[in-house]
Each structure stands twice: as structure tokens, then as C-alpha cells.
Image: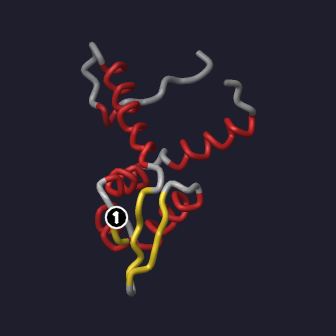
Amino acid sequence: MELSREQFRNQARILKALSHEARLLIVHRLHAGECSAGELTALVGLDQSTVSKHLAMLRGLGIVEDRRKGSSVIYRLCTPCVVSFFACASQVLAERCRGESVNSTQVRAPAMGR
């Protein structure tokens, strides 16, 4: 199946949304079930306005959706398939680190153009 530049551009937007630790934490938590914005804020450990911006990005791309429940906003994962990126990323890290004694928090992308 041939993909157009626009399809690649749209896929890049999804991958960019998943490229931040806070958004990965949110997606991982929502994979287990619905959660309030307050609970997600506590989980991520950032201020409410910052978490709100992360949630807005995920919502804008259709990864999560929200609903009101009284005075709370409840979020749910719309596309559970995004969690498969976690397994893929873990496999990339495992294969890259195989045979090396590199701490996964210090893994850096190789320099381009060498």
C-alpha cells in the first residue's frame, strides 16, 4: 500500500504527540481505564495547565476524548492501539542495548550525517 506525503505528515503528528514522557504516562494510564483530569495531573506531576495542554494535544488528534461528570472532566483512550508503540519502543531499546551496558535513561539517538 502506497502512502501519500499527507498520510506520512499525519502519522508524524501522531508520533510527535506520543513523543513526550507526560503524554506517554497519560496514554499508559488511560489504557487501564477512564481517569479524571485531576488524577492525571497528580500522576504526571506537572501543574494543571501543563497537563491540560498535553491532554488537548492528545484530544485534538483523536487519541483521547473527554466528558464531564459533575465538576470533573473524565478522559478515556479512544485508540488503544497506540499502546502498541510502547512494546515497539521497548523492543528497539532492547535490541539497541543488547550486548551493551547502557542505562536506558542515557540512550541517545545517533548523530545524523556521519
Q: Secondary structure at mark 1?
A: loop
Closer to us: 51 or 67: 67
Image position of 42 with respect to 26: above or below: below
Report the quarter where the C terminus lies.
top right
Indicate the quadrant where residue 76 lies: bottom left
Q: Residue at x 53, y 61 (%)?
A: 59
Q: Residue at x 49, y 64 (%)?
A: 65
Q: Residue at x 30, y 32 (%)?
A: 104
Q: Residue furthest right?
A: 5
Give the residue type at disc 1.
Glu
Closer to us: 12 or 113: 12
Closer to us: 108 or 10: 10
Judging from the image, the colouring scheme is secondary structure
Indicate the quadrant where residue 37 lies: bottom left
How far from the left and from the top, in percent, is residue 28?
34, 50
Image side of residue 29 versus residue 23, left or right: left
Image position of 99 with respect to 45: above or below: above
How far from the left and from the top, in percent, is residue 95?
34, 19
Q: Residues within 10 Å of mark 1 (few under 14, many from 20)?
A: some
Number of marks in the rendered image: 1
Indicate the quadrant where residue 44 lies: bottom left
Image position of 98 with respect to 47: above or below: above
The residue indicated by pointer 1 is 34
Report the quarter where the N terminus lies.
top right
How far from the left and from the top, in percent, is residue 60?
59, 60
Image position of 110 with respect to 34: above or below: above
How far from the left and from the top, in percent, is residue 24?
40, 49
Q: Residue furthest bottom?
A: 70
Q: Residue at x 41, y 66 (%)?
A: 75
